[in-house]
Amino acid sequence: MKPSRSGHLPINGLSLYHEVYGEFGTSKTAPLLLIPGAHMATDSMEPWVSAFAGTRTVIVFDQQGHGRTPDTSRELSYPRFADDAAALLRALTVERADVMGYSQGGGVALQLALRHPTLVNKLVTLSAAYRRDGWYPSVVEGAEDSGTTWWAGTSVKKAFMAHTPDATAFETYLKKMRIFGNNEQNISDAEMRSISSKTMVIAGDTDDVKPEHTLAMFKLRGGDADAAMSRAGVPAARLVILPTTHVGIFRESAVLVPMVNAFLDDVTPTAPDLF
């Protein structure tokens, strides 16, 4: 599937690569901003773009140092990535968008909703954590240990070297990503409750994110079984748990996209009379 527009924009000192599928103002639905995970680029989002683009305009972009967006001397952080996403939306004259992020991208989406609430309509997190302790310790340790040798021959290195053919620069980027992963983010419960966007929380039952953390996120975002039982319209938050892993859930676009579309479109859950 080909984008209707693509290219680089000067965003917060970056030459930020982005793609847009569809045209703004031609759909009744809000544009959807998709944010890839760590070391991932726009190309990895193709199954999700294809599934969503039939009903809404889709925006994807490469974060700093990822894909076709070159790294700079700027340190990496969730707030900075969120500010880049906000600046991109404003550069595209998008006043309000639905936002969905996977893994690291889900953390960026949370920061975007916190730091730029007027830009975010609905929020969807896919296998994301709002605090460092939400990840299993082995996951954090693995991110810290992934050195240059591990990435040799991967699409991540090939994409980086295409715009910055400098092995030292790639090593610097990986070191910054390890520091970034080690720092993670620490969003408080109060901040999670303060997010104004209705939220869908999605994870796998054997995800890299602890299931109790996923459930806590759902509750902090307004998940309330009592309200659901009352059949009082569209719930403030939705929770989806699939029998799969952190990587596996990214491949479940065929299963998840109809659920996400229903959430974004405010479809009231059906409640048939059984008794």
Image (tube, rainbow, N blue to C red):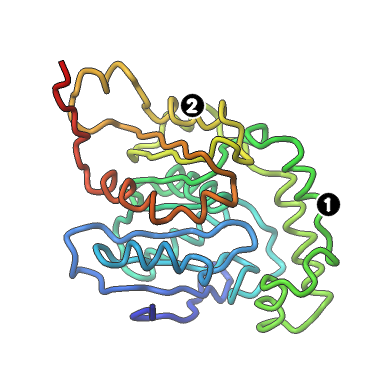
Q: Which residue is located at x 53 percent, y 73 percent? A: 16
Q: Which residue is mark 1?
A: 145
Q: Secondary structure at mark 2?
A: helix
Say whether residue 110 is left or right of residue 275: right
Residue ID for mark 2: 190
Answer left or right for 98 relative to 240. left
- Amino acid at circle 2: Ala
**Which comes before the other along the chain, label 1 or label 2?**
1
- In percent of width and height, residue 242 lies at 47, 39
Q: Find numbered disc 1 in the image and state the secondary structure of the residue it sits on.
A: helix
Task: Look at the picture and state if 20 lies above or below 123.
Answer: below
Please state, as top left, top right, bottom left or bottom right, where the N terminus lies in the image.
Answer: bottom left
Q: Residues within 10 Å of mark 1 (few under 14, many from 20)?
A: few
The quarter holding residue 24 reads: bottom left
Image coordinates of residue 126 in percent, x first then y, are 49, 46
Between the residue at mark 1 and the residue at mark 2, the CA separation in whole angstroms equals 33 Å
In the rendered structure, which amino acid carries the disc numbered 1? Asp
Q: Residue at x 37, y 68 (%)?
A: 50
Q: Is residue 133 above or below residue 91?
A: above
Q: Is residue 233 above or below residue 49?
A: above
